[in-house]
Image (cartoon, grey):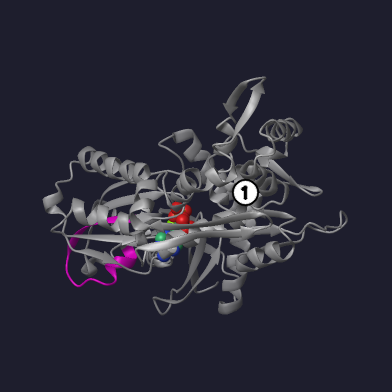
């Protein structure tokens, strides 16, 4: 039997795994891999599918001239009942198959470090995979469970991700605290309110300490989509006019641009009808230059690279007050200064949704803000200044703590593993 247990945080953007040595009772290493898959464009039907995971997937996709099949934010398909499978070359892969590839990668990297075949894992899950919808949630966890089994884990427990984050924070405190934990990731924002007590680490039953959990389906991906909508789509012809009938000009349909706000949805443009429609609008717009950019974007699969630029702009604005939205590829030229105020206007609706959800969460669970001793924020999106400010403004007198934004969930999941051990 392996003396190790793996804490696994399968995230929308990044997946992390903490190796927990059950004999030494400590984490020995944590690894992190972007949750990205890439299937090369050239594949032989007689061979198993060739694919790469993580950073290598990004490099291979870009060096292959953005051909092949590139998949990001795979966690989002877990709750989608309409997603049955996707055909990649000669193979059909369902949601669990795709997730399996990421979990397998994490497991094999960790097994190499431990020199074992560790089959025991605590896997995180968001409080809600999708908006509060039980059947979708059950489906998502079932698919994740199947993926874990496929990846070679046969002793698997699930834990809410924000509880994982809380257990990581608990390691850093010295006295009892009531803590509001917010884990703001790429796909979801999760909350838990609980009583942490370093003296209780190791206690078998911590259920009574967890006072409330909740979450909302908004994260960094939502901010990037909002940015594409507000600042990106005008460069791709959102304001283009075309001659619908002699003497009658109309704006091209706005629905076209909804589909470029999430790069995964750009597959929508593969249909013949929509391609023909786009050519028709282009023709009747008298070959409008910005609308041409939409055609260039679609024909050359540039969606992901535009979103990389958007993310870069966002990340810069976490540490400085201005940034540039700069993209130069084929004939598409974007070079615009973005101030922090502009950025905050772009994400304002999402921030409001997070803030409203927080109100509901406190109200629903009858949490009196005066009783909260501290806040713990984690996840990549917790670095967005406006997000930090939202918490500072809401709870001006409560100390705000941060930790490792990308690894704390995996670490805490590993720390929480003992709760599931048979005594
Ligand atoms: N410095 C930064 N400033 C602002 N946002 C950032 C920064 N670094 C990363 N992000 C954003 O954080 C998100 C990823 O965070 P994280 O790795 O915590 O998510 P995840 O765990 O994969 O997602 P989820 O928990 O929702 O499944 C992305 O949207 C990314 O763009
Ligand atoms: Mg996360």
Residue 392 position within the rendered picture, expressed as x and y whole percent measured from the top left: 21, 57
Q: Residue at x 39, y 47 (%)?
A: 346
* Viewer-side residue, 387 vs 12: 387
Q: Is residue 371 left or right of residue 75?
A: left
Of residues 297 and 92, the one nearer the viewer is 297
Between 145 and 380, the residue placed more toward the observer is 380
Q: Is residue 413 above or below residue 272?
A: below
- When asked about the image quadrant of residue 92, the answer is top right
**For mark 1, does the 10 Å Cα neighbourhood hold few (<14), some (14 to 19), or many (20 or more) residues?**
many
Image coordinates of residue 393 in percent, x first then y, are 20, 53
The answer to which quarter of the image holds residue 384 is bottom left
Looking at the image, residue 138 sits to the left or right of residue 48; the answer is: left
Image coordinates of residue 374 in percent, x first then y, are 19, 60
Residue 409 seen in the figure: no
Residue 363: in sight, yes or no?
yes
Total marks in image: 1
Asked whether residue 244 is drawn in magenta, I would say no
Residue 405 to residue 75: above or below = below
Res. 181 image quadrant: bottom left
Quarter of the picture containing the C terminus is: bottom left
Q: Which residues are magenta?
A: 167-182
Q: Residue at left 67%, top 19%?
A: 246
Please name the residue shown 58% across and 55% down the image. 306
178 magenta-colored:
yes
The residue identified by callout 1 is 96
- Front position in the image: 300 or 218: 300
Secondary structure category for the residue under label 1: helix
């Amino acid at each position: 039997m392996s003396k190790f247990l793996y804490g696994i945080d399968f995230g929308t953007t990044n997946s992390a795994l903490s190796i927990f040595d059950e004999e030494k009772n400590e984490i020995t290493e944590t690894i992190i891999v972007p949750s990205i898959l890439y299937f090369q464009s050239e594949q032989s039907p007689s061979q198993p599918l060739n694919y790469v995971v993580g950073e290598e997937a990004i490099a291979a996709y870009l060096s292959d001239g953005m051909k092949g099949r590139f998949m990001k934010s795979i966690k989002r398909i877990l709750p989608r009942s309409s997603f049955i499978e996707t055909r990649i070359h000669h193979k059909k892969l369902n949601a669990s198959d795709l997730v399996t590839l990421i979990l397998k990668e994490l497991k094999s990297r960790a097994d190499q470090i431990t020199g074992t075949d560790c089959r025991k894992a605590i896997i995180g899950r968001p409080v809600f995979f999708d908006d509060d919808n039980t059947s979708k949630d059950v489906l998502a966890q079932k698919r994740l469970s199947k993926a874990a089994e496929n990846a070679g884990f046969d002793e698997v427990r699930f834990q809410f991700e924000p509880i994982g984050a809380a257990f990581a924070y608990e390691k850093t405190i010295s006295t009892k605290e009531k803590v509001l934990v917010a884990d703001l990731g790429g796909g979801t924002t999760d909350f838990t309110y609980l009583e942490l007590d370093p003296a209780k680490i190791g206690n078998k039953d911590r259920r009574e300490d967890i006072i409330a959990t909740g979450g909302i389906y908004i994260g960094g991906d939502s901010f990037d989509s909002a940015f594409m909508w507000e600042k990106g789509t005008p460069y791709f012809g959102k304001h283009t006019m075309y001659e619908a009938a002699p003497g009658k000009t109309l704006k091209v349909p706005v629905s076209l641009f909804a589909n470029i706000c999430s790069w995964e949805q750009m597959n929508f443009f593969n249909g013949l009808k929509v391609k023909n429609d786009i050519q028709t609008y282009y023709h009747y717009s008298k070959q409008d230059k910005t609308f041409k950019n939409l055609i260039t974007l679609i024909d050359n699969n540039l969606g992901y690279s535009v979103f990389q630029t958007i993310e870069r702009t966002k990340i810069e604005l976490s540490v400085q007050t201005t940034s540039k939205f700069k993209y130069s590829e084929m004939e598409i030229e974007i070079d615009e200064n973005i101030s922090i105020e502009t950025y905050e206007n772009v994400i304002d609706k999402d921030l409001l949704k997070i803030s409203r959800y927080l109100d509901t969460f406190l109200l629903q669970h009858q949490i009196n803000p005066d009783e909260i001793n501290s806040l713990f924020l984690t996840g990549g999106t917790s670095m967005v200044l406006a997000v930090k400010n939202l918490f500072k403004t809401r709870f001006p007198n409560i100390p705000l703590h941060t930790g490792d934004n990308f690894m704390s969930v995996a670490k805490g999941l590993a720390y929480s593993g003992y709760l599931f051990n048979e005594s």
